[in-house]
Image: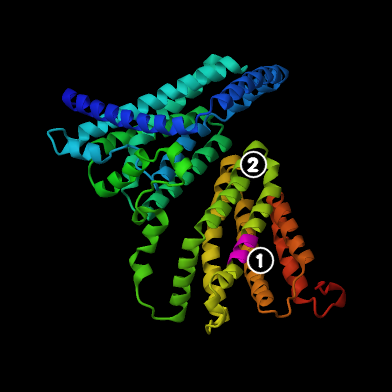
Amino acid sequence: MNFSTWEVYRWVRSQRFKKKRKLYQQAFQLTFDLTLAIYAGVLGCVFLFILADWLNRFIPLLESWQLSVAEWVWVLPFALVLRACVQAFFHPGLAFTTSEMNISMLPHPRSHLLWHIAIVRGFFHTLGAFLLAFGIGWLTPFTFAFTFYIAAIFSLFFSLTILVQWKLFSLSRWKNLLMIGTFFLLIGILRYLTINFGIQEGFIGLTVGLLLLSLNIYLIPRGLKGVDWGRVVDVNDARVWNVQLISQMTKVYIKPPKRYGVLQTYLRTRRAKQRFTSINQLYHRLWRYYFHHQFGYVWKTMMICAAIIVILPIQTDWVMYITLPIAIFVYIEVAASLFVDQFREQPMLNILPVEEKGWRQTYFRWAALGSCVLFLLYFVATVALNGLYPGLMLQMIGLVGWSLLDLNHRLIERMNAFQRKDVKASESFRLIGYLFLGVGMYFPPAVLGVLVPLLLTKYAEKLPFLRPMT
């Protein structure tokens, strides 16, 4: 690395910092209130005393938490790798902006600039991790040895994922998704080995560390190959100059160009632009446009369902028996609501000759595609917690079958209700199906009970006592 390149890069960072500091000072002068600051300081001191007293009461509980956290330290490397893969959809991790691009036009190679940026980023994250570890060790019963141990693991694996995120950012979205899928498969395999062969969890961290180290050694000579520099610069410029305080005050947010968004990238694919050859392709185009404008509801629903399926069972295994049916139920209800909402958002659909079955089937394919994410998360969470077992395939078949059948029935019911037709629905039959689904997560053969509501619905007209209430 060239020392003169470091001097130039340091000067650019200092000038950028001074400009942003000046902007923050101007914004702070407009919002600062001395009286409010005094009251906030007094209340902050009182809060610290209350917090100290509260922590003294829960010292035994916090000490037990240290043992629990120590058992799950092996998850931290996977979390950091997953974080890098997910963030690669949005930014490259290394703040290579227009300023660095202009410097690279001078006799300062881009490879040297990237090295400096990576070192600075790794240094500040490491410093922040150890300062946070010191604060936690000072304010809580956690020992300094334990907190510094966690900080060291975080710093090591964070540094190993910097280059991985940089390379993934320039890859296509499908390759990124393939990498995430491969990563989850690796988690399942390693977890299976630890459960069934008695391998220590430390072996998992060591394996992931060696794999990341080998991957970094392979990527270092290829760090500049296949990089979309225009996209990198545009995204980083928006991130660097998006001053949060000013954005909150003015409600003006600096964002990357829309052509680089995750959804926009998919909308620009050749398949999304091809001419219509059938009415179903038109329906798919309309639903794609609708999801574009309702993307906020879609991703929030997916995140909530993913948290219910993955995060809660980590604390207690048996929670999965309850959370999985709830997550599937929430997803299907939101999907059915969005299906009907299209007619309210686009009043023209009420007068256009829309073919009902094709319209519903195209939406069903979109909703089923989204549910596949939840199925994959359940599979990965189950393998990570319990390993592979014979009943898992039966559970997956029951889960997928019941979810898709219930989704199809709900879409038909919502369509009939919107058209003011007779709606024949039985919430009691549906409840039975979800109960069998939850029991099937504990006892796999019980998942076949999801067939009971289907049989009851089929013979409800023949057996009067089974007729649902309308």
Q: Is residue 135 left or right of residue 171?
A: right
Residue depicted at x 62% and y 16%: 141
Q: Dots 1 and 2: beta carbons under 8 Å?
A: no
Quarter holding the C terminus?
bottom right
Residue depicted at x 35% and y 35%: 162
Task: Point out the residue furthest to the bottom here.
Answer: 353
* Chain-order first, disc 1 or disc 2: 2
Q: Which residue is mark 2?
A: 312
Q: Secondary structure at mark 2?
A: helix
Quarter holding the N terminus?
top left
Q: Which residue is mark 1?
A: 406
Give percent across and percent down for residue 185: 47, 46
Give percent across and percent down for residue 435: 75, 56
Q: Quadrant of residue 342?
A: bottom right
- Report the magenta residues as a range: 332-338
Amino acid residing under circle 2: Leu
